Amino acid sequence: MSGALVLAEVAGPLAAVAGGAAFARVKAPAVYWSAVGLPVTAARFAATYASTMDACGLTVTPSRLRVLMLRATTRREIRPVPPKVRRLRPTTTGLRIRLRLAPGQEPADVTASAERLRHAWGVHTVHVAVIKPGVVELRLTGFNVLRRVRMPRHLPTGDLLVPVAMREDGTAYVRDYRAIPHCLTLGATLTGKSVYMRNLIAGLARRRVALVGIDCKRGVEQAPFAPRLSALATDPEMASALLDALVEEMEERYELIRQHQGISRAVPDEEITSDVWGLPAKLRPIPIVLLVDEVAELFLVATRKDEERRDRMVTQLIRLAQLGRAAGMFAEICGQRFGSELGKGATMLRAQLTGRVVHRVNDKYSAEMGLADISPEAVLAATQIAPDMPGVAVAGDSSGGWTHIRTPNLSLAEAAAVCRQTAHLVPDLPTLSRFRPHVPPAAASSEPTSLVKPHVVTE
């Protein structure tokens, strides 16, 4: 009887701990990783590092000096040398391991073995990042960080740095407009493309930039952000006039650069190599971000007159994409499809859009339009996004690098509230003043406030 009591006293807490760990692994993976997964993975890594690297072919023959020293001091067997571990840093989502590559190795060797390392150490993913020549970082994630997005606590700051989503390696995906000035965002209906734009607009609204919107769906997507917009076009005619005004603003900024640097007016804009960031702060114009909701609406034509307007709009968009970066003007182009079938100038415009974000698409050709010139693997990844994971996208750039990202859920009301709270940051741009959207006053409370002060009546 006493043995049964002892067994119950021991088995009860163990069962509770095991049940709690299983529950946390499903409902709170970050807690499970910090409490259980991280210690187990760190111990497994320390015990199997050398043998795992040898099995993956990531070791090299030791140098002659090392061989002579080992033979002179010990009688141990001479074994191949793995990359040296420089630093091991735990995080809330995984583990960061910095390695010094052995002579003769390159980062591609480690990248090719990432899947084998993942299985050897029992983690969700292993990504390889190059820190500097000869040094790489293994970014291990203990669970699927895209299943339930929680942005990192420490995010980069800056007027042109906007954290938008979570990358699959546990770091933040940041739109850096100085590095990637223009971006093309594609995705089918209900894939999270609008949520991505809401996060981007909410992030930009808090910064010292001017936001310009083109929403030819009568403004249903961008009208809620009107308090923070410097200009808004809701039909193709307004969009054409707005693009003309933006090109005029760009030419004025180039004229400002000419005056400051003493450049002759005869020098064309294309040959001016400097930009507005070289101007003194008091003269530097505020950056402008153009947000086009559905670019296909700008290409569709029904009459000859519409075709002439379309050609002009496309020409102005291409000019902005080619020359806008130096003038501090950037573009975010969104659509469901984007390719040569839209009409003349479409592929030329796409070539100027360095950044690419592709959500789930309905066919492979749509993914190829956005990612084929980046990486064939990225195209395949975009076609394999699950329908039950809205907000997941493949983000890449012209360098050939790409990654899975997912934006945190942000409702339209929450994004609109951010724009109302930051309405005081709207800059004064005379060139765009006639396109400033009308913002109705806040609605009054439905329950009138009584002006009669109640008095307590006592008997």
Image: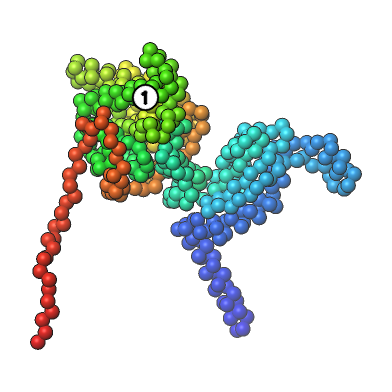
227 relative to 69 in the view: left or right: left
Name the side, left or right, on which 108 lies relative to 330.
right
Q: Give the vertical position of 238 relative to 199 (above or below).
A: above
> In the image, residue 221 lies at what x, y percent?
26, 39
Residue 282 appears in view: yes
Q: Position of residue 237 (x, y in %)?
A: 20, 25
Residue 132 x, y percent position in the rendering: 62, 36
Q: What is the quadrant of residue 37 in the picture?
A: bottom right
Could you tell me which residue is drawn at 34 percent across and 28 percent down? 337
* The quadrant where residue 231 appears: top left
State whether residue 393 appears in this view. no
Left or right of 455, for residue 39: right
Q: Residue furthest bottom?
A: 459
Instruction: State which quadrant residue 425 falls in.
Output: top left
Q: What's the amino acid at mark 1?
A: Leu
* Extreme-right residue of the structure: 72
Report the residue that reaches farthest toward the top: 266
Callout 1: SS: helix
- Residue at the disc numbered 1: 256
Q: Looking at the rendering, in which quadrant would you find the C terminus?
A: bottom left
Counting the numbered discs, the total is 1
Name the residue located 41 percent from the left edge and 34 percent from the top edge: 281
The N terminus is located in which quarter?
Answer: bottom right
Q: Residues within 10 Å of mark 1 (few under 14, many from 20)?
A: some
Q: List x then y, in percent, for residue 48.
A: 69, 49
